[in-house]
Image (cartoon, rainbow, N blue to C red):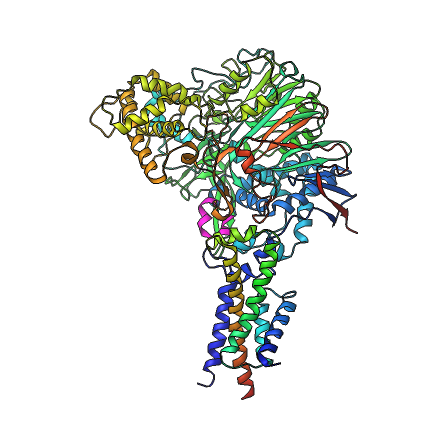
């Protein structure tokens, strides 16, 4: 008994040590986490924006001037130092996000989060994200060591920052999840570019369409999913002369879709990922200078996807939005040109059914057996044994679906052909754009760009405006890749690519402006097959109508257009519904709602109730119309909004309008009433719960922290109008992630803002300080410094000096 | 000076010095060491180092956070969750450190008794 107290106190000591030193479920290791000399209290710091920092490998001094928005204005003496500094500064302000995004891209989240992320990780690996990054690196090794050297400089810069960190300096997320940053490598930059490619060109519905075709037949499919909608206001204006194209479209082989039943498909990127951009010529501009605007629509996250920087050397001087992990400015301007991107949304993913031999080492192709290659994906899982997933590769690409993943096929699988796997030199495009001086430089820079296909808008101080739809596009036969194809038939392979010079483009058009908003790239006369991959049909028309509404435009007009809340979609259906719906059976409360929407002018402003009624009404209606598509164990995609509204107005008696569940045969006008009543019911509930259903409140826009929108690090109830398919495309958690307006004075004058802040540290006042101004439709002047001198807009200068 | 005050000061100083070299559990090491060399009795064995470290962690946290308008503390106090109140988070921080120190000191006391026998 003598030692009982000793043993007991010893056990208690060990116990408290264990509990405070270990991450238990979602609870961080509390002792590590809360102690003031290494825990989160060390993250309660102001930004360091003065003094000197020595960085190994720098050739010369680099000045970093910070303005009041915490935008670093970098003045380096050469490109190597410049990209080293970019890596260093990006890590300094955004380290956790920088690394986390590449973990997400590579399918490595289980390492950080644990088993809950395993399914996600397997999906990303089967999608071939790591494989694609490897291809990009080996392409650069072979064809462009210069670019690879800059990518290595960036990596060195990131690592210079990581190396000087003490565990106490780690961003708070590392402390929360109890792990450490690892070394940055060029492959991580390639992974980041893959992440962008997936986000913007990683979606397709081929397998869902295969199910639709099988269940509803070809006539219905063509009606529901036409290649062109009845209206088309394409990126490249209608009636462009394409006669200079002398390469024909691939000839149509005798090929049939394979009508397999597909149970489920992998998670796709948000279909709202899109953007607006436009530019007006000097003639159309009130000041005589071209003006350009860009606003990429992406998930609203904290830390924000963009990090704004000025990056200059004695030879070039670029400014704009960068993406942590990629080199140079992505959407911005320099002294001579401005550029910005919207997603070109082209079908660059196709699916092939492949048959295996008995031991799954070969697959059938052209009547012979061809070898499969194997890529073993070794997935580390926090606190568990590794999970090994064997992915088979064909010449098409990875077999994403097989008996080990979302499929029951014993000796067959679905292989993915994706331009994202092709390797390429996307980074080079941005390096060149940052230096470009005129239209020719811009065109040369674009030639390196493979994917994701983008509409690159351009304006120069020379007075040119242009827009190229750039990407590597397969020259497909009519209809190729709409549905699952037989992977053993060589005719189904992509036969060739559209020669880059024949990509659709427009320079200095007569109408005096260029614009794109993810709509159809071309009219029906473009000589290559372009499948309707979910093209926008509303924002583009509002934008183009705006620019034909008067003679001259100025920056103020551009701001108004960015913040334009006009809901064209509702304007095209609500009056029709009101006209064709019988209102005799409505009760008083329903009639009140009816009169509310009747008086709505179709603006999605924050204090309106119309947008909420419309959202409810159309949402219920859409589900009723396409109830046939809601099947268990069958992957299906219902038709797009534009075609749905078209059918409601023009084919109201179509058999698919019927609600299957009921005995009655419903038509469109029956659905209007049924949907309205259901919507009213829900709206009244919302009113009961929350007091009102005004748009700002109903929508509840938020910017969620990258870790599953951790509430403590997120911003909720941001008062902003708009919605998807509206020029101000702000929906709940998605919207204009960077708004930029550049007037091509010499040097250019620019405005920019994004929903976030320059710091990735939730403990910094710069973490989310742009959000309120962004929501209010305000902009910040981008202080374009012309020389390495701290002007009065600069609040601090830090000098990076070569380490001895 | 009586042993309580001496122990209090020694624990505090040692904890601060060790914090430069060791992770968070330096407070346990400090409290254990002082318990070995500056003996206390009864509840004071636990309470004196508990208070010393509570004070250390709470005051240091307060100083760091106060200089930054409690920006992060407010968020962490929402995360944990402590109603978003940074002062509660500071108190919790102090108590966590204090507890670890106090328990380690209790063990130190028992060790010193075992050696004496």
Q: Could you say where residue A414 lies in the image, as x and y percent from the top left?
A: 43, 35
Q: Is residue A153 above or below residue A663?
A: below
Q: Is residue A117 magenta?
A: yes
Determine the residue positioned at 39% across, 27% down: A610
- Residue A631 visible? The answer is no
Q: Is residue A81 left or right of residue A4?
A: right
- Residue A540 visible? The answer is yes
Q: Is residue A246 magenta?
A: no
Q: Is residue A640 above or below residue A686?
A: above
Determine the residue positioned at 41% across, 28% down: A608
Quarter that holds the N terminus of chain A: bottom left
Q: Could you say where residue A200 lies in the image, as x and y percent from the top left?
A: 52, 32
Q: Could you say where residue A397 lies in the image, as x and y percent from the top left?
A: 51, 35
How many numbered callouts?
Answer: 0
Residue A293, located in which quarter of the rendered image?
A: top right
Name, please, the residue furthest toward the left: A663
Magenta residues, start to end: A109-120
Q: Is residue A673 left or right of residue A362?
A: left
């Amino acid at each position: 008994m003598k030692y009982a107290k000793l043993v007991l106190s010893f056990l208690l000591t060990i116990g408290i040590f264990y509990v405070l030193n270990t991450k238990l479920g979602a609870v961080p290791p509390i002792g590590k986490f809360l102690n003031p000399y290494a825990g989160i209290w060390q993250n309660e710091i102001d930004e360091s924006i003065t003094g000197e920092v020595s960085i190994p490998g720098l050739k010369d001094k680099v000045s970093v001037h910070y303005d009041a928005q915490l935008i670093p204005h970098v003045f380096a003496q050469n490109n190597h130092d410049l990209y080293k500094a970019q890596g260093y500064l990006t890590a300094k302000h955004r380290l956790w996000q920088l690394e986390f995004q590449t973990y997400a891209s590579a399918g490595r989240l289980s390492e950080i989060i644990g088993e809950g992320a395993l399914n996600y990780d397997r999906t990303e690996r089967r999608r071939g994200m790591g494989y694609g990054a490897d291809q990009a690196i080996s392409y650069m090794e072979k064809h462009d060591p210069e670019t690879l050297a800059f990518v290595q400089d960036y990596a060195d810069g990131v690592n210079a920052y990581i190396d000087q960190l003490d565990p106490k300096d780690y961003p708070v997320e590392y402390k929360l999840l109890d792990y450490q940053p690892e070394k940055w490598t060029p492959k991580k930059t390639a992974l980041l570019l893959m992440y962008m490619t997936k986000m913007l060109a990683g979606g397709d519905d081929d397998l869902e369409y295969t199910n639709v075709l099988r269940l509803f037949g070809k006539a219905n499919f063509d009606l529901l999913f036409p290649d062109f909608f009845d209206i088309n206001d394409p990126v490249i204006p209608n009636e462009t002369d394409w006669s200079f194209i002398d390469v024909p479209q691939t000839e149509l082989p005798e090929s049939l879709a394979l009508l397999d039943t597909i149970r489920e498909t992998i998670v796709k990127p948000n279909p709202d990922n899109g953007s607006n951009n436009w530019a007006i010529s000097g003639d159309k501009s009130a000041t005589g200078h071209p003006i350009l605007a860009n606003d990429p629509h992406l998930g609203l996250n904290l830390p924000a996807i963009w990090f704004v920087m000025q990056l200059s050397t004695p030879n070039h001087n670029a400014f704009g939005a960068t993406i942590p992990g990629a080199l140079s400015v992505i959407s911005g301007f320099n002294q001579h040109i401005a550029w910005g991107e919207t997603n070109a949304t082209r079908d660059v993913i196709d699916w092939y059914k492949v048959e295996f031999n008995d031991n799954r080492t070969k697959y059938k192709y052209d009547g012979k057996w061809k070898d499969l290659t194997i890529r073993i994906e070794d997935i580390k899982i926090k606190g568990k044994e590794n999970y090994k997933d064997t992915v088979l590769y064909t010449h098409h690409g990875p077999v994403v679906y097989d008996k080990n993943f979302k499929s029951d096929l014993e000796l067959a699988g679905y292989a993915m052909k994706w331009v994202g796997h092709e390797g390429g030199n996307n980074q080079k495009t941005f390096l060149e754009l940052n230096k470009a001086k005129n239209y020719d430089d811009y065109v040369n820079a674009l030639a390196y760009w493979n994917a994701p296909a983008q509409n690159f808008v351009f304006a120069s101080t020379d007075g040119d405006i242009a827009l190229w739809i750039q990407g590597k596009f397969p020259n497909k036969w009519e209809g190729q890749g709409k549905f699952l194809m037989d992977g053993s038939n060589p005719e189904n392979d992509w036969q060739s690519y559209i020669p880059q010079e024949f990509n659709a483009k427009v320079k200095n058009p007569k109408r005096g402006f260029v614009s794109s908003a993810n709509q159809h790239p071309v009219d029906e006369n473009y000589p290559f097959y372009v499948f309707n991959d979910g093209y926008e049909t509303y924002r583009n028309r509002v934008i183009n109508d705006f620019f034909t509404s008067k003679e001259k435009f100025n920056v103020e007009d551009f701001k108004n257009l960015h913040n334009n809340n006009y809901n064209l979609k509702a304007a095209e259906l609500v009056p029709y519904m009101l006209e064709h719906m019988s209102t005799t059976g409505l009760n008083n409360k329903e009639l009140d709602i009816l009169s509310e929407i009747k008086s709505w002018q179709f603006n999605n402003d924050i204090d309106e109730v119309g947008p909420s009624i419309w959202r409810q009404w159309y949402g219920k209606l859409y589900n009723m119309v396409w109830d046939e598509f809601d099947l268990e164990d069958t992957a299906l995609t219902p038709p797009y909004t534009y075609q749905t509204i078209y059918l409601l107005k023009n084919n109201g008696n179509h058999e698919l309008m019927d609600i299957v569940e009921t005995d009655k045969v419903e038509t469109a006008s029956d659905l209007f009433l049924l949907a309205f009543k259901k919507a009213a019911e829900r709206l009244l509930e919302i009113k009961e719960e929350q007091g009102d259903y005004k748009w700002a409140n109903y929508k509840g826009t938020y910017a969620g922290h990258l870790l599953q929108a951790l509430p403590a690090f997120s911003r909720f109830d941001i008062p902003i109008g708009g919605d998807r398919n509206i020029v101000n495309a702000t929906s709940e958690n998605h919207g204009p992630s960077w708004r930029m307006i550049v007037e091509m004075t010499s040097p250019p004058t620019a405005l920019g803002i994004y929903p976030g802040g320059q710091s990735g540290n939730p403990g910094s006042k710069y973490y989310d300080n742009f959000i309120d101004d962004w929501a209010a439709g305000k902009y910040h002047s981008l202080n374009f410094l012309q020389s390495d001198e701290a002007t009065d807009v600069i609040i601090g200068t830090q000098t990076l000096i070569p380490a001895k | 000076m009586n042993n309580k005050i001496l122990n209090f000061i020694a624990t505090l100083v040692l904890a601060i010095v060790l914090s430069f070299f060791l992770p968070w559990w330096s407070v346990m090491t400090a409290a254990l060491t002082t318990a070995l060399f500056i003996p206390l009795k009864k509840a004071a064995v636990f309470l004196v180092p508990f208070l010393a470290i509570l004070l250390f962690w709470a005051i240091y946290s307060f100083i760091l956070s106060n200089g930054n308008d409690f920006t992060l503390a407010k968020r962490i106090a929402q995360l944990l969750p402590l109603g978003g109140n940074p002062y509660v988070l500071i108190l919790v921080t102090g108590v966590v450190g204090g507890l670890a120190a106090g328990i380690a000191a209790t063990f130190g006391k028992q060790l010193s008794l075992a050696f004496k026998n």
